[in-house]
Image (cartoon, rainbow, N blue to C red):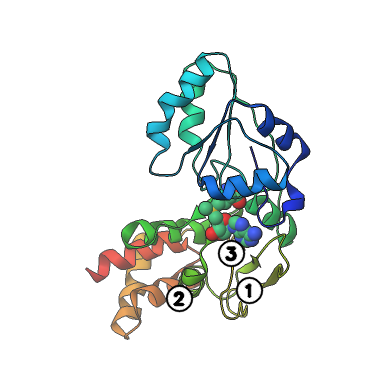
């Protein structure tokens, strides 16, 4: 069940009814959810901690309660459970055990940010948090660079500068971007522009980055042509990233593929 992402006025009325009626509320943090319940004037029957570390072990309790014919609600600290938050494993286990699973829909930072981004919202991709480092991050950035649908990313304030710099490096300066912070809160703000021009200031609060779809449709330049152009650029002193960006631009080939060829060449 969804809970507010910053404004207590956004707690859905049906969520209040359901929270007051279930036998067990699974939440990430009992203090935080306790405050929400207090705000809504509810005394929950029973709260149980279900966070990224305990979700798996909570499955037994949840199935016991459901098996006795009672209901369980799952909430996260903010927004919609299961969306970069615990919930997915409990849902899967309840479905597997053939219990009825439903949701009280409500706030989610991702859908709110897409809605107000100004980019196409009829098709979009939720990427959540990018992997923090290594090959996983590089690969995911490459996929984002070539994505032909609008993309939604979550990011913590202390990693905003680096993520924006990485996105600029792989997607190029002309890619449209909308950065929303502190959605539904007092200091809510959305800055729109391109990766080359946007200034998100000193990162503060919680962020959603929405990237416009890639505009260049890929054309056929062979791998050999790309390798030759990359070799020239690398020899001239360009970094792997810059060489890949330039050659992708020159050939119209997908940035991810060109970057991979550049990494292989540079080994
Ligand atoms: N389940 C949540 C949802 O449905 O939006 C997301 C939980 S995830 C752990 C937390 C991330 O969501 C934050 O780091 C930020 O990227 C995004 N987020 C949550 N609340 C936000 C808000 N009020 N404004 C902007 N981003 C927010």
Q: Earlier in the sequence, mark 2 or mark 1?
A: 1
Residue 121: percent from the left, percent from the top?
71, 51
Front disc: 2 or 3: 3
- Judging by the rendered image, the residue that carries numbered circle 2 is 246
The image shows residue 101, relative to residue 109, as above or below, that is above
Q: Secondary structure at mark 3?
A: loop
Mark 3 touches mark 1? (CB < 8 Å)? no
Question: Which quadrant of the structure image shows residue 174?
Answer: bottom right
Q: Secondary structure at mark 1?
A: strand
Label 1 near ligand 1 (CB < 8 Å): no
Residue 183: percent from the left, percent from the top?
69, 61
Neighbor class of circle 2 (other Cα within 10 Å; few <14, some 14-19, many 20+) is some
Residue 45: percent from the left, percent from the top?
60, 30
- Judging by the rendered image, the residue that carries numbered circle 3 is 206
- Judging by the rendered image, the residue that carries numbered circle 1 is 194
Q: Is residue 177 visible?
A: yes
Ligand 1 quarter of the rendering: bottom right
Label 3 near ligand 1 (CB < 8 Å): yes
Q: Secondary structure at mark 2?
A: helix
Neighbor class of circle 3 (other Cα within 10 Å; few <14, some 14-19, many 20+) is some
């Amino acid at each position: 069940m969804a809970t507010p992402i910053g404004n207590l006025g956004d707690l859905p009325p049906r969520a209040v009814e359901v929270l007051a009626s279930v036998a067990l509320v699974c939440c990430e943090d009992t203090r935080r959810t306790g405050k929400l319940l207090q705000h809504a004037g509810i005394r929950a029957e029973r709260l149980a901690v279900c966070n990224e570390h305990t979700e798996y072990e909570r499955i037994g309790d949840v199935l016991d309660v459901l098996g006795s014919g009672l209901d369980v609600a799952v909430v996260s600290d903010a927004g919609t459970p299961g969306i970069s938050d615990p919930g997915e494993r409990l849902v899967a286990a309840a479905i597997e055990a053939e219990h009825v699973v439903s949701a009280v829909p409500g706030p989610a930072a991702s859908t709110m940010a897409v809605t107000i981004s100004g980019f196409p919202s009829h098709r979009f991709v939720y990427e959540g948090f990018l992997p923090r480092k290594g090959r996983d991050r590089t690969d995911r950035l490459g996929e984002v660079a070539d994505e032909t649908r609008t993309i939604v990313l979550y990011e913590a304030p202390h990693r905003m500068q680096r993520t924006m710099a990485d996105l600029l490096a792989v997607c190029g300066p002309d890619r449209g971007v909308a950065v929303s912070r502190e959605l539904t809160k007092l200091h809510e703000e959305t800055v729109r522009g391109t990766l080359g021009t946007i200034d998100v200031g000193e990162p503060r609060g919680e962020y959603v980055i929405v990237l416009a779809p890639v505009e260049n449709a890929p054309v056929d330049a062979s791998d050999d042509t790309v390798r030759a152009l990359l070799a020239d650029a690398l020899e001239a002193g360009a970094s792997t990233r810059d060489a890949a960006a330039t050659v992708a631009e020159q050939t119209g080939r997908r940035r991810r593929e060109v970057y991979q060829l550049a990494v292989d060449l540079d080994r």
